[in-house]
Image: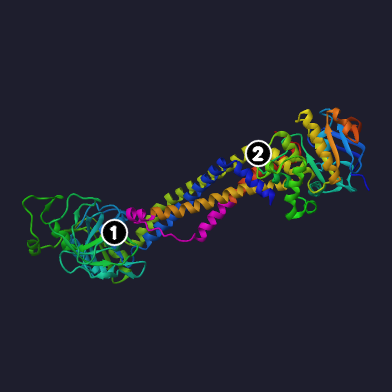
Amino acid sequence: MIVLRLALQSLMNRWVTALLTIASIALSVLLLLGVEKVRNGARESFANTISGTDIIVGARSGSIQLLLYSVFRIGNATNNITWPSYEDIARQPEVAWAVPLSLGDSHRGFRVLGTTPDYFKHYRYRRTNNLEFASGQPFADLFDAVLGADVAAKLGYKLGDKMIVAHGLGDVSFVEHDDKPFRVAGILKKTGTPIDRTVHVGLEAIEAIHVDWQSGARQPGEAVSVDDVRNLDLKPKAITAAMLGLKSRLATFRLQRAINEYPREPLSAIIPGVALQELWDLVSIAETALTAVSIMVVITALIGMVVMILTTLNERRREMAILRSVGARPSTILGLLTAEAGFLTVAGVALGTAMLYLSLAILRPMLDRLYGLNLTIEALHWHEWQMLGAVVLAGLLAGLLPALRAYRLSVADGMTIRT
Amino acid sequence: MPDVLEMANVSFRWPGRSGFGLAVERFTLKPREKLLLIGPSGSGKSTLLSLIAGIVAPQTGRISILGTDIARLSASHRDRFRAEHLGVIFQMFNLLPYGTVVDNVLLSLSFAKERRKRAGGQTGERQEAMRLLTRLGLEQTLVEGRSAASLSVGQQQRVAAARALIGRPDLVIADEPTSALDRNRQIAFLDLLFSELDIAGAALMMVSHDETLASRFDRVANLTEIARVLSGEEAPT
């Protein structure tokens, strides 16, 4: 239809402002969808990471902090639990199983977790899933390591390969435990949790690579050979945290209180689900703020569009008078201008959505690696469609403002050409 | 055959405080008649043209175009009626500058189903537009795919004439269409317009304050003889 074609040409005639308007709407939509995506992705990957563990014990600290470093490998422990305390707690009658966790070393950017083979038996993710081995088995020898799926894939390790663990947590470490290499004994299947980015070794191995170290540096001339190490008593003096499974869930709160009031050293016991909820409560303020900001940005972009259309109205009175002279009704003018706003908004929404998927495709591996945030590339959810629909609706409503003004102008001007 | 235009006992006042209005006792235009309406500015030209085009409706009286009293039609029917039966040429700025020349011509068929059929429908309208443009002295090479903005003022007025004439309207109203042209071009423009008006069988009502063009028209009238301006205090009768 010629009228629509001319309307489009009119818009193309103003392509710079039109394009900038579309771009600003697109960016606002990208922000809106991006915030939603990251929020859902974060919740999902956090909620799926741990299940089946009733209590996590660590040194006295905030429950969120303990949860973050023990389960999600985010941040560091401020203090340790002494081994006798751990053994004491593990021996409590309510405790069905206990798995110690020792953190603090890394291997080429991946964290090293010292634990016991029980870890692979008791750890659950995505509600009921067990850890499964893609190849190999839990560590049997002192210097055996079990790799998470991402570690093996990223560093190209196969069963039987030798690897050297570095001290500290940096991506590149100059202080390496290079005198005591590990052998890859097993590789886990992908879980979509921080496990994928973890190197698992025996608790004794963590002790072993540190026997000749004092305060973070190797003591010159005191190197202990691998064979000598094997003969040492490698019982750890301290661990970072422990996961507990209880015989009965009913005992959870009682044991939690008992640990929190543990007389020999200050400890914290958390229930993962409860701590996670606390984390959500904390994060939801930020989430709400982010959502509010992105809604504001959308509104700003739409106001920009209204301003752009409004400023063209005066110079387009000629256009409107010509349309009226060939028989266009004032309502046609109203429709054309609303359609223009609708077109700009829909184009912005489409471009913004495309930008979301493009940036997901580009940033996903990085987010996964740096923050353990596993965002899935999938079709838009119903909720996201609703948000986009709301943006388009808001765009049309905003477009009514200049359209109504044009309507009034075209009624008043009639066929009089004012320039 | 009924008169193309018949106005009787028309009185109209613009809404708002200015209260400018116009009263026309009796005014007719015969089919194919070419009328030059002379009037100084402020004599109510635009108001008269708006009434005839059906942009506004009079408070009282009758405005018959081909026997249809458009004063009794609803606003949207008046718009449709204008699309089907009238052609309009403005003084200047007739064209949508970003549109092609042909689209500018075809624009007047967008809201008129019958007129579009008369112009040859979807298959023939483009050819008809080209025919008119060529007849009005715009070469095909000048027109093909060009945007209207690239034309000279004289060329633009001829495109506007083609738009007013396509689909054989019954009445063409023109508001000083030649005032932006020099003398020679004025004559040339009118000659082309008149010959196409004859082919289309349309009447012409042209407003101008240039009386030197009078000899070429069937009839010359002074606006002050036809219409009486209503001042603010006077009530419409």
Please name the residue that numbered disc 1 is placed on: A154
Q: Position of residue A205 (x, y in %)?
A: 16, 62
Tag shown at residue A289? none
Q: Does any portion of residue A110 appear in the rendered image? A: yes
Label 1 sits on a secondary structure element that is helix
Magenta part, dominant SS: helix
Q: Position of residue A118 (x, y in %)?
A: 23, 69
For this rendering, which residue is in front, A264 or A399? A399
Kindly identify the amino acid type of the residue bearing the numbered disc 1.
Lys
Label 2 sits on a secondary structure element that is helix
Compared to residue A21, the image places residue A247 above or below, namely below
Kindly identify the amino acid type of the residue bearing the numbered disc 2.
Leu
Q: Residue furthest left?
A: A221
Q: Earlier in the sequence, mark 2 or mark 1?
A: 1
For this rendering, which residue is in front, B44 or B133? B133
Residue at 37% of width from left, 55% of height from top?
A: A279
Q: Disc 2 and disc 1: Cα gap in Å?
A: 58 Å
